[in-house]
Image: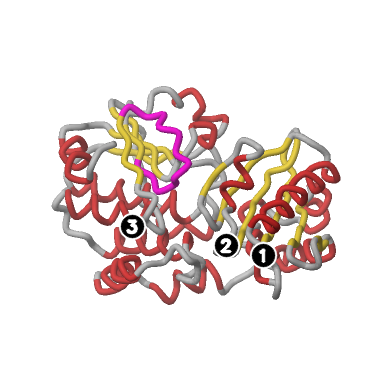
Amino acid sequence: MMTVPQICAYLNEQEDILILCHQSPDGDTLGSGFGLYYALRALGKRAQVVCSDPIPPQFSYLLPEEMPQITPRCIVAVDVADPQLLGDKLSCLADKVDLCIDHHPSNRGYAARTLVRPDAAATAEVMAEIIRGLQVRLDQRMADCIYTGLCTDTGCFQYSNVTSYTLRIAADMMDLGADAYHINRKMFGTKSKARIAMEREVLDSLIYAMDGRVAVIAVTKEMLDRTGAKESELDGLSSIPREIEGVKVGITLREKPGGFKISVRTVEEIDAANICALFGGGGHARAAGCFIPETLERCREKVIDAAKAACKEAGF
């Protein structure tokens, strides 16, 4: 495991750096990736950010006016805990990653060099330290990137992963010009009509178990077809079940080819990562995920059984 100073020394020696984001990109992988990109460019280095999936339009403000194609001599993955998360288009690079910067405790240690900080609320929190360690003067563009990663991975600073240090970095980014109001509104205060229609469909799918301690919603391909919602419009749906009064474990089942992606959100007494580990997944204590190659009914049954067991073990 490397330290921030060691990472900075390593990056200072590299050229032609390819930065990999995970599939279905969120604000943390993109904010961290483009934050590093702008820092490396400020050092006069050639760099490029790539992702298997298209970058959702709400993150367009992070993108450079143009980004040249490079032939990489160094490959860096940001916020990618497992090489499978790179997606089909980047899977060929899974065993070629020179450096991984992450905050997920479930990181599989697949890169030649790794910096994982499970105590960090977001990878962007670590990236802020790295940019400073590179002795780059953070500008507004980098500040927007870091702030985006922080706010999206903390639910606009609502989640239990937020520390006073997280808030200090966010404040620093605002002092450097990060447009917090517009970023927060874009990420949390604006919804498309298709998203609203999707929320209605999802709420219709809601079922409870264990006297309301467990709540489960589903997102199926049929729902997406009916509403016209895009994958990029589904962020935040996983938080809905846990927001219900009395719910200890909130579960979202999202249909994918061959099965369902499972997102688990829990209260402090229950470890979401332990639930997902039963199905080969992982993540954080309060938010984790896995994939189950089964039908909707079978997936629902399996995760509800696991959630019930976790609730009983916690004394609920």
> Could you tell me the amino acid type at mark 1?
Lys
Residue located beneath label 3 in the image: 125
> Could you tell me the amino acid type at mark 3?
Glu
* Quadrant position of the C terminus in the picture: bottom right
User: Are the residues at dot 2 and dot 3 in contact (C-beta closer than 8 Å)?
Assistant: no
| Residue 8 appears in the figure | yes
In this view of the protein, which residue sits in the foreground, 71 or 217?
217
Mark 2 vs mark 3, CA separation in Å = 25 Å
Residue located beneath label 1 in the image: 248
Above or below: residue 9 compared with residue 42: above
Q: Quadrant of residue 72?
A: top left
User: Are the residues at dot 1 and dot 2 in contact (C-beta closer than 8 Å)?
Assistant: yes
In this rendering, the label closer to the viewer, 3 or 1: 1
* Quadrant position of the N terminus in the picture: top left
Q: Residue at x 26, y 70 (%)?
A: 172
Residue located beneath label 2 in the image: 269
